[in-house]
Amino acid sequence: MHQSWPFRIMIWLGVAVLLLWSLGPVYWTLVSSITPAADFSARPIHFFPQNFTLNHFERLLGINVDRIGGVEVWKQFRSALFNSVVSSLAATVFCVAIAALGGYAFTRLKFPGRRPLFIAVVATIAIPGYAVLIPLYRLMIGLHMVDTFVGITLIYISAFLPLALWLLRSVFESLPIALEEAAQLDGAGRLYILFRIVLPLAAPGLTAAAILTFLGAWGQYMVPLIFSPTQTKPLTVLIPEFATKNFIDYGLITAAGSIAIIIPALVVVFLNRYLISGLLAGSVK
Amino acid sequence: MTAVTAINMERKRGAASNGDAILGLIMVAPIVITMAALVFFPLIDTMWDSLHRINPMQPGTPFIGAANYTNMLTDSDLRASWINTFIYVVIAVAAETVFGVAAAALINQVKFGRRWLLAAVVLPWALPGVVNAVIWMWIYQPGAGLLNGILTTLGLPFDNHVWFNDRVSAIIAVTVVHVWRMMPLTIVIVLAAMQSIPEHLYEAARIDGAGRSKMFTSITLPLIRGAIAIAMTNATVSAFNLFDEAWVLTSSSLDTRPVLIQIYLETFQNLHFSYGMALSLVVTVVSLLVSLLYVLRVYHTTRFD
Amino acid sequence: MRREIFRSMIALAAVAWALPALADDAKPLAGKSITVLLPSPQAANIAADFEKATGIHVDMQTLSWDDIRPKLVTALIAGTAPADVTEFDWSWTGQFNAAGWYMPLQDVIDKDTVADIGVAKIFTVDGNLLGVPYTNDFRVMLVNKKQFADAGITKMPTTLDELVADAKQIKAKGVVQYPIGLPLSPTEGASTSWYLLTKAFGGDLFDKDFKPLFLTPDSAGYKAMALEAQLLKDGLVDPASTGLKDSQINDSMFAKGLTSIMISGEPGRLGQMNDPAQSSVAGQVIAIVVPTASGVTRSYGLPEALGIPKVSQNQDAAIAFVKWFTTKQFQIENYANGVLPTRTSALADLNAAGKLQSGDALVAQSKVIDPLFAQGTPTWYPQFSSAVNTAINGVAKGQVTVDQAMQNIADATQKAMTQ
């Protein structure tokens, strides 16, 4: 449809507002992290840094200052980053693997209780984490799994499994069954079909499920606050601690925030397509 | 296909279906075991424990029946946090829906660079909630924050204004952060629905002489109603579960405290575990009921379409 | 040949005899590693110095004070040690003793140390010493005497009325915009400030049966709350204080010369405030005894100790740290970092050497300190304190009246006691 000029201008204005709204705060955080602390209260405010400094990052990464307030900041930051990556990746790998196996079974294999089991599992999407938090906490205490990678990964898996399962099942269902039937006629076993034929075809769906799980696990706060308080503390728990502890130091906080933004930003930029298809499939409850 | 082959296939299928059943059960076993151990049994545990008194400071776990639930009725802090939560839900869902649909409509009109626009729009959703909260905490900061900076540059008297001192502005400030994070989800859902509306419907309307806004209200809106309902359900449940933003921005301040922070304080500050469990069950039920309202309403209205 | 063997054997014997002397027998625990959790900030070289002295590696972790207790509680309930040595605040003694989480130390800390540290009494419950006090925090008021002088005030206030009048004068003369530093956020610092003002009005929080004494308008606690509301209304306290903790007000306002009076002043901070490397008002800060309604000063103590959780895996090394941290030598050195020694001998030495800043005021104040809870800290203290600072926050934001606030605190106390 031909768009008139006033309409087009309106659209561009709208897009500008939308971009400003979505990216503005992120831009401001990045800019603040490279602005010297003295310039923070400068008025009138400058949207582009007048002076440039890497001092905040240097202190955060322990390049020229070893300890701030007696603490090895870089060491804490580095281990929190490591913890976030490990627990998120582990949760993603296992969650998607289990969901793929189960999803295929729910789709193509007939076994007793198939329908009720599926509904029961997917229905748990409606149960929020805090409703089971304390029994889980006591369970983990009993198993000595508090503050361990195994413990937190298990919890993340149980949190994101229903969604991944739902997503993968709809992906598998939409694959033409003819391919699998042909392979069956050729004498291929179920598992062979799954791994050699179905999974490669479902790669976009698997990627979407992986991204949703990864981002979900990466962004968890309340759960690791309780289940990963010290040794396995992730980035999301560390950053607010910074905010209350090194209060004056908005330079340090924005620097830490900038680093925490990088990984989700990379995922969004490069895996945009899969993320969005995942979001769509996942929300049609 | 000859009869023999057909019978062979049947036999294979018959044999396969037994093998299938066993294989199927094995393949779903990890899921079932995980969910049973980490969700179903804990949920039953929560329900059972909420009828007892469990407190690590005190010995024993006596059965106290519905006492936890009746205590909720006289808990004034809890009442305050429920009110706050409902305010968050109403404002957040309204803002996310209205602006989300508008933004989706906007993006739908953009042909060039839509992929990048979507990536930018989705970014706030992809970030961890606490990182968002820290970003906005810096923006709201009285002395050096961006918001006061912009307002004072425009000549308005907001130098060192403390946004969290006034209850209304504090609640709005927290809600803004929440909406910033959750609106992309609404946008994506609604946009997908908009993109599946067949072009010929618009063509027909144009031929009939309809203007843009008429097309929007009579074609687009009705057809995306289902998607809007889904988006609103998501928005409602996530607004009920608001925690990260309020915690980082205002910690335990009562005027902005949502019910989830109340649960956290009861459980980990006062160590009243069973009371916390009873509370969490109530919140779960309430948020599900409210979202059920939408689903039923949508089902009702779409029946006539 | 035999001579070779004989010589080698002598050599071997010599080496075998010398080896023990070469070994580090002054550092029996060398090579071990412990984690220590303390409130921020701490001196930068604690870990390094301790390692040099004992060979034990320290992973020093600091958190803002208000974040420490939830961290301790969630870990200890789970049966894991949040650290080998942790902060142990006076206000947690009731609750933590009831839960039995901390290792009794009376058998591993020598009697002389316990005798030298007066406030160790507060941490001794049922005969068990649960923590060794390391910082002797009692409250005074910290003032910027230069700003007082700039406003034309020569005599330090001894009554609350004088204090308010002085603040108004400082503001009127344009010396600073918000002369009084008072935290009003829902954090512990707000609670402790209110306790101090209650004491200043000549009253207490509870009677011996834990019945609230702050409900009537003529009670000390009520007046204290009303005073806080009034100070805010008169523009003497920064409105942003509703979101600031006491540590933040100290560091971002008082140390930068933006406020003149810290109501609940920590004497340990004198070192920091008068150190040019750490503050912009070096040389201008003194401590004064707490002005009261009657003119006769009172205050209370809130010492902090080092405790060792029973589930710590490195108890020996942890005990070594606790002992090292509370030696007279270290306490005198650490005073420069704002940690007021708990050993009476250390305090006496510092004062004699003239190094105890505002020594006379501190000594005078220390003579009239009572514990906040004469009956011992109750197990429900955290809930009580949270109700107090939530109420203060509500009053400051104009959302509840002082009457309602006091009633809310009393109700919360009642609920806490019965649960």
Image (tube, coloured by chain):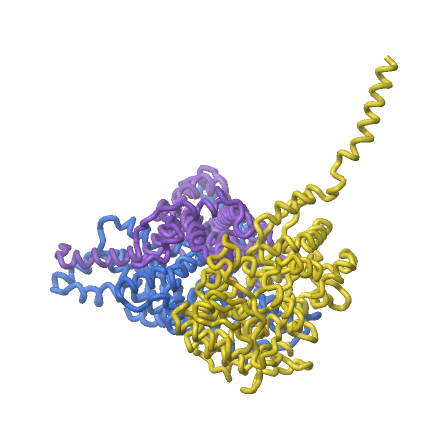
Chain colours: A purple, B blue, C yellow
Q: Is residue A284 visible?
A: no
What residue is rendered at 52% in x and 52% in y?
A234
**Where in the figure is residue C86, as x and y percent of width and height?**
64, 57
**Where in the figure is residue B76, as x and y percent of width and height?**
52, 79
**Where in the figure is residue A237, as x and y percent of width and height?**
51, 56
Question: Which of the pair B19/B285 is nearer the observer?
Answer: B285
- Left or right position of C20 against C310: right
**Where in the figure is residue C55, as x and y percent of width and height?**
68, 42
What residue is rendered at 35% in x and 51% in y?
A31
Quarter of the rendering occupied by the N terminus of chain B = top left
- Left or right position of B163 against C316: left
- Left or right position of C13 against B295: right
What residue is rendered at 66% in x and 73% in y?
C368
Q: Is residue B297 visible?
A: yes
Res. A3 image quadrant? bottom left
Kindly give the residue lying farthest to the top in the view shown.
C1
Question: Which of the pair B49/B118 is nearer the observer?
Answer: B118
What residue is rendered at 22% in x and 51% in y?
B111
Quarter of the rendering occupied by the C terminus of chain B = bottom left
Res. A22 image quadrant? bottom left
Question: Which of the pair C39/A121 is nearer the observer?
Answer: C39
- Left or right position of B236 against C79: left
Total marks shown come to: 0
